[in-house]
Image (spheres, grey):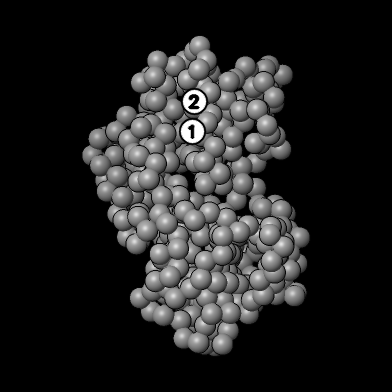
Amino acid sequence: MKRLVLLGAGHAHMVALRQFAREPLPETELVVVSPSRWQYYSGMIPGWLAGHYRFDQCRVLVEPTVIAAGGRLVLDRAVELRATEQEVVLASGERVPYDLLSVDVGSASDSAVLNEPDSMILGVKPVERFAEDWPATERSLRARARPRIVVLGGGAGGAEIAMALARRSADCDQAGVVLVAGSNGVVPGFRPRFRRLVRRALMRCGVEIVEEYGEPVVDGVRLAGGRRMRADAVLVSTGGRALPFLGASGLAVDEAGFVRVDASHRSTSHHNVFVAGDACSRVDQRLDRSGVHAVRAGPILARNLAAAISGKPLARFYPRRFSLYLLAAGDCTAIGSYGPLTFSGAWVWKWKDRIDRGFVDSFPGA
């Protein structure tokens, strides 16, 4: 009997586990290692911040899905991966050997000063850490007179969070929200019309936009030009960084420390290791690190893990030519993009809400 270890309970792994529940793996011991008993759906976190969802509506219990797939859940965090020895070392000191390993541990917000005591600087990744830390931060902000919240990062995630916080701040009679978007502006990489609509939505919410690079410091943000912005809380939503233990694992990684994988999401250096979601870097093409691709990769990952166990050929994951992006604007409207098409309105929010709720409700622990 072979042992398959799933390290992390990210979107791709949850979808793969759901597939294993329908099509059980033969002669396989399945072990899932996750630091949290919950899987937080990142697509609903801005809606939770804006007050549209309860906290429990944005997460799924991991264990029911693991049990349905015939596996065992280990609640612990990986601190070391030894690819040559084929084992994972956990924070508790336990060593978990494997025959086949799949990694879906996400990434972390890119800042060296996150989560220091009393710093009020929070990274939005990993999502489970942010979701657990935010309530205490919000209580502290409510106790201050007209606090200022700064969001670092002008991508889709940063824009969504800034608008959600502005909506929540208006309800609580709090002060402003500032989005430090960087020199490339708001949602770079998207088509001009989409970018214009997002900018208008930010302005409609009262979000101040600063198109300059910034980095968090103890009492706020230091901009590239030298100016310092005072902030009562800083949320870092810049590009994610690879978790350090991956770079020291012996697996082939790119210059940023993400594991290099082929079109089947198998490690280019160790063929008994697969990696999905934010933790990997495709060698054959550029693949955005987004929940959209992670969810789409889940069924192919499940198929390839089953194939690797039985010695069958692997399948390639072909990302769709166009991906559907739905960006919540904080006020029960949303902005959408699909290839050359851009659209917005309350109906887009209803569409996004239906998709997000449907994903969460598809798991037994919802």
In the rendered image, the quadrant that contains the C terminus is: bottom left
Residue in view at x 34 percent, y 39 percent:
53
Residue 327 in sight in this render: no
**Apparent side of residue 156 relative to residue 213 in the rendered image (left or right):** left
Q: Give the x, y percent position of residue 342.
A: 33, 41
Residue 247 in the image: above or below residue 88: above
In contact (CB < 8 Å): disc 1 and disc 2: yes
Q: What residue type is labelled 2?
A: Arg
> For residue 135, which numbered disc appears in the image?
1
* CA separation in Å, label 1 and label 2: 6 Å
Residue in view at x 62 percent, y 16 percent:
230
Q: Give the x, y percent position of residue 24.
A: 41, 80
Q: Which amino acid does label 1 sit on?
A: Pro
Q: Give the x, y percent position of residue 135.
A: 49, 33
The one nearer the camera, 365 or 156, is 365
> What residue sits right under mark 2 in the picture?
139
Residue 147 in sight in this render: yes
Residue 99 image-quadrant placement: bottom right
**Apparent side of residue 173 relative to residue 272 in the rendered image (left or right):** left
